[in-house]
Image: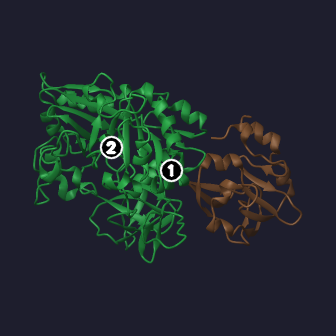
Chain colours: A green, B brown
Amino acid sequence: MNSDPRTTVLYPRHRDAGANMGDFGGYRMPLWYPAGMRREHRAVIMGAGLFDTSHMAVVTVVGLGAHALLQRTFSKDLDRAGAGGGPLADGRCAYGAFLNPRGHVIDDAIVCRRGPEDFFVVVNAGMGPTVAGHLVAVADAAGPLVSDFSDQVAKLDLQGPASARILGRLLEAPERAFQGLGYFAFKGHFDPRHPDAEVVLLDDGTPLLLSRTGYTGEFGFELFVAPDRAPGLWDRLLTAGAEYGLIPCGLAARDSLRAGAVLPLSHQDIGDWLFIHHPWFFALPLAADGRTFTKDFIGAAALLEGAAGAPHTLAFVGRDPRKVGTGPDTRVLDERGRSIGVVLTCATDTAIGWVEGRIVSLASPGRPEGFDPKGLSCGFVRVRKPLPAGTPLVLEDGRRRIEVVVTADIRPDRTARRPMTQMWG
Amino acid sequence: MKEIDALNLPEDVRYAEDHEWLRPSEDAARIGISDYAQDQLGDIVYVELPAVGRRLTKGEEFGTVESVKAVSSLYMPVGGEVTAVNEQLAEAPELVNTDPYGQGWMIEVKVTDVAEVAALMDRAAYLKALGG
C-alpha cells in the first residue's frame, strides 16, 4: 500500500464522533466508536447499525463482450446464477471470486447485473485498479469498457432488522423502492444523470443505488450514493434511526458480525491458495455431480487438477470469548495433537453463547430469559484434510491454546434473507 | 479515541510505562490498567489473572486482557506477592472499560521493594509520557 492511508468522505464524521481509527486496505477507517464494538455488534443483531464502507471499490464492465468477459473471469456461472438455475436477471447480484490461472484468489466480488452487457462489480478496499487491470488484460482489444469507478461513489451499509423501517422514513416512495427487493437484488443509480436515478430517491431528491446485500449476515442494505451526498445521508440516517437503536459501527463489529455469519475476508480467509474446499462452495459453478464445473473460467483447470491435494477451509466455534492470533505462526491441532493447519480468522461474536449444547443468539426465538451471552470465539482454519462438523480441535498461537469444534454454521437465526414484506410495514 | 485532556488520570495512583496503575497502600497495593489503555484496547471481553500467592517480579507478565483487537499482556509495575485478584472480572470484564481505577481493578500485591513504587510515574509524568 502507499505510505499515507487515504480517508473516505465521511472521515470528519468519524473523527468528530470520537471513533478509534485504524488502517485497513490503505484507508484510515473507524474501528469502533465510543459505544464500543460489543454494543455496535449487538445493535446490528437487535436494531440496526450504520457502517461507512466507502473504502470498497467499484469496477464497471459495460458494452459488447461484458458478459463474456465476466463468464471467463468470475467464478460464478452468470448463466445459472439466477432464480431456478436460470441466468442472473437484471437487478440481481451474485457472489464469487476472480482467480488467477493457478486457481488462487485475486479478490472476491459481488457482480451486479444492470443489463445483458452492463455490470458493476463491488470489490475490496484498494482492489479497484488490480481487478480492473486483470479484466482489461483478459479482454479482447475490442472488448467492453472496464472502469475503476471507486472514487465516484460512496457506500454506506445500513444493516440490521430495523433497516427498512429506518430507510423508509427517508425515501420519497418507500413502497415502490422496496417492492420486489429480495435478497441480492438492487435498484436505482447514484449518478443523477443515469436514467435509473429516478428509481430510488430520497425525499430530498438524492438518487441511491439500493442493494439488498451486506457483510453482517443480517437484514439490510448497501447504499451507493454520490460522494458529496454521503455526509448528509449519514447524518439523516442516524437521526431517523435513533429510536430504533441505530448507531454508527466500525470495522471491529463488521469483522465479528461477518465471522459469526460464516463470511470470508478476502486476502485472509481466501487468498493465495486454491479456491476450493471451503464453506463458500456456492461461489463456484459446481455441476450436479459436485466435482465438475458448469463453465470454463480462468483458474478452473487448476482447481480441478489440484482439488485432491488442496487444503480445506473450515468454520469453527469456541467454548467462550477467548481468541487466538491468526496467521502463519498459529497451529491447529487434531485430537491426537498433530499439527494440521493454521488459523485464518479468530473473532468474538459477542451476541452468541452455548445453551445446552446449542449455539443461541440474542435474536434466537427460544433464548432463555435474561440471556446475556459473553460471546464465543469463531472463525476459520485451513487444514490439510476434510473434517466433519463436531470435530474438536485445539488452536494455538504461542501464547495460548483454545478448544474449538468444527461447525457448519455459527450465529443462528440470522436475518439477511428475510423477505422484505416481513421487515417493512 | 479519547483526546489526552479527556482521559481520566487520577492523582492517587502511580503509573507504569506499560499503562498499568498501582494504588499504594500499607497492606496491599491494587493494580489495574489506565483509562488510556482501556480506551486503546476497546471493549474488553476476557481477563486472565494469576493465582493468589504467586510471587512475581517487576516487569513479569501477571495476566492477559483480551479485547476486540487482540490479547495483550499485563505486566507487573513492581515486584510482589499476589494477595487477591478481582473475581468480578470473570463475569464482568467490561468493568475494566467502565471503571478502570475502581471496580475494574485486577490484582492486589504485597510489594517486595517500596523503592519500585517510588520509581513509578505520577500523574504529571504519565501525562507527559502520553504526549500531553
Closer to us: A354 or A247: A247
Label 2: few (<14), some or many (≥20) within 10 Å?
few
Closer to the eye: label 2 or 1: 2
Picture coordinates of residue A209 (x, y %)?
33, 35
Q: Which secondary structure lies at badge 1?
A: helix
As measured in the structure, the alpha-carbon distance from the residue carrying label 2 to the one carrying label 1 is: 20 Å
Contact, CB < 8 Å: mark 2 with mark 1?
A: no
Residue A276 in view, yes or no: no
Q: Is residue A125 left or right of residue A286?
A: right
> Quarter of the image containing the N terminus of chain A?
top left
Query: Residue at coordinates 50% horizontally, 67% vertically from top-left?
Result: A320
**Do marks 2 and 1 share a subunit?**
yes
- The chain identifier of the residue carrying mark 1 reads A
Query: Residue at coordinates 68% horizontally, 37% vertically from top-left?
Result: B3
- Return the residue found at the far bottom: A356
Picture coordinates of residue A254 (x, y %)?
45, 48
Tell me the tag on residue A244: 1
Query: Residue at coordinates 35% horizontally, 51% vertically from top-left?
Result: A264
Q: Hey, which quadrant is residue A205 in on the image?
A: top left
Tell me the tag on residue A10: none
